[in-house]
């Protein structure tokens, strides 16, 4: 049975390809819509497609340049295929519910101090939470000055672990249908996306729990990519693990070949090209070779 082993990272200029070859894939925030909220997710993304699926009016139209790795390298380096979901699906609702259920209980140790105030009856008389699931409301309102500190700590740790796990779900979830830059609907499911997530950078919601705009979200939306240059936020890749380098123009093949020979070694690159472990060519050439 035929299988597609290529994972393509498509871009729109040659300089980005050169930077990836020498420095690696740098993490950036990407906008997703999950649980009725816009979210910034830190990642590097790839598409598990044939070359013929790239281009205007095709499945992926992000540019005519790219760096290709194989699936084996991806698995060894923590990349995962995304889970495609639709609005109000079981998975979509589960992500939202788990997020809401695990958020407030992480603050139980702080909330207990409120119960020591004069005239205290229940926490929600003093603080308003949004959202506040019924189960969480019952939990926090059961807290008073007599509640055992060890119990509060245990619940807090449990909620923190649950919250961390829902972030992993968010990191690897994507709506199967999205809007492109021209506000046209497209089926993202067709891209067969794989991601390297960087959870250490955090997930940023467009709005706070209060419903106010999150300035951190606005900051990153207005920042050019790539967003991060620190080594821990870069997916490093050796030239030996790159299977294809894609350029748009034929003259750029020799330019890119000379560039990587200068960066690595003529002997190494000549060997990779001779054995076809590495192929450098135009997108049209690779389409014809399939």
Image (cartoon, rainbow, N blue to C red):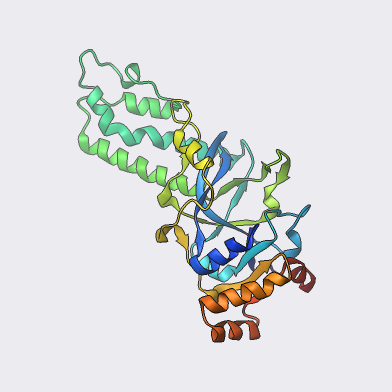
Q: Residue at x 54, y 59 (%)?
A: 80
Q: Residue at x 39, y 29 (%)?
A: 136
Residue 265 visible to the viewer: yes
Total numbered labels placed on residues in the image: 0
Q: Which residue lies most toward the top here?
A: 119
Q: Would residue 125 be found to the left or right of residue 146 on screen?
A: right
Specify the quadrant that holds the N terminus: bottom right
Can you give x and y, in whole percent of width and height, for residue 280 in the image? Answer: 66, 74
Q: Is residue 79 above or below residue 155?
A: below
Q: Residue at x 25, y 16 (%)?
A: 120
Give the quadrant of residue 106: top left
Q: Is residue 282 above or below residue 152?
A: below
Specify the quadrant that holds the C terminus: bottom right
Q: Would residue 253 be found to the left or right of residue 27 on screen?
A: right
Residue 275 visible to the viewer: no
Can you give x and y, in whole percent of width and height, for residue 110 in the image? Answer: 26, 31
Along the line of sight, the residue nearer the viewer: 9 or 178: 9
Q: Residue at x 68, y 56 (%)?
A: 63
Q: Would residue 116 be found to the left or right of residue 38 on screen?
A: left
Give the quadrant of residue 239: bottom right
Can you give x and y, in whole percent of width and height, for residue 109 in the image? Answer: 26, 33
Q: Is residue 107 above or below residue 259?
A: above
Q: Would residue 138 be found to the left or right of residue 257 on screen?
A: left
Can you give x and y, in whole percent of width and height, for residue 215 in the image? Answer: 45, 33
């Amino acid at each position: 049975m035929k299988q597609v082993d290529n994972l393509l990272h498509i871009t729109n200029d040659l300089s980005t390809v050169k930077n990836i070859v020498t420095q690696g894939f740098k993490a950036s925030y990407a906008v997703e819509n999950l649980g009725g909220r816009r979210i910034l997710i830190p990642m590097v993304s790839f598409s598990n497609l044939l070359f013929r699926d790239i281009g205007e009016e095709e499945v992926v139209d992000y540019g005519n340049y790219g760096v290709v790795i194989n699936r084996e390298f991806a698995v060894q380096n923590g990349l995962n295929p995304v889970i495609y979901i639709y609005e109000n699906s079981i998975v979509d609702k589960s992500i939202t519910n788990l997020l809401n259920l695990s958020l407030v209980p992480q603050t139980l140790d702080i909330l207990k101090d409120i119960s020591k105030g004069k005239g205290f009856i229940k926490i929600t008389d003093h603080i308003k939470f949004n959202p506040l699931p019924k189960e969480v409301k019952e939990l926090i309102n059961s807290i008073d000055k007599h509640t055992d500190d060890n119990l509060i700590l245990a619940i807090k740790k449990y909620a923190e672990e649950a919250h961390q796990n829902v972030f992993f779900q968010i990191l690897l979830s994507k709506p199967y249908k999205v809007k492109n830059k021209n506000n046209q609907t497209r089926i993202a499911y067709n891209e067969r996306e794989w991601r390297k997530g960087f959870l250490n950078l955090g997930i940023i919601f467009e709005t706070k729990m209060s419903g106010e705009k999150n300035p951190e979200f606005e900051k990153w939306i207005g920042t050019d990519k790539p967003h991060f240059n620190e080594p821990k936020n870069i997916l490093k890749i050796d030239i030996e693990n790159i299977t294809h380098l894609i350029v748009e123009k034929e003259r750029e093949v020799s330019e890119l070949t000379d560039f990587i020979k200068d960066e690595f070694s003529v002997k190494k690159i000549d060997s990779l090209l001779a054995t076809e472990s590495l192929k450098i060519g135009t997108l049209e050439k690779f389409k014809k070779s399939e």
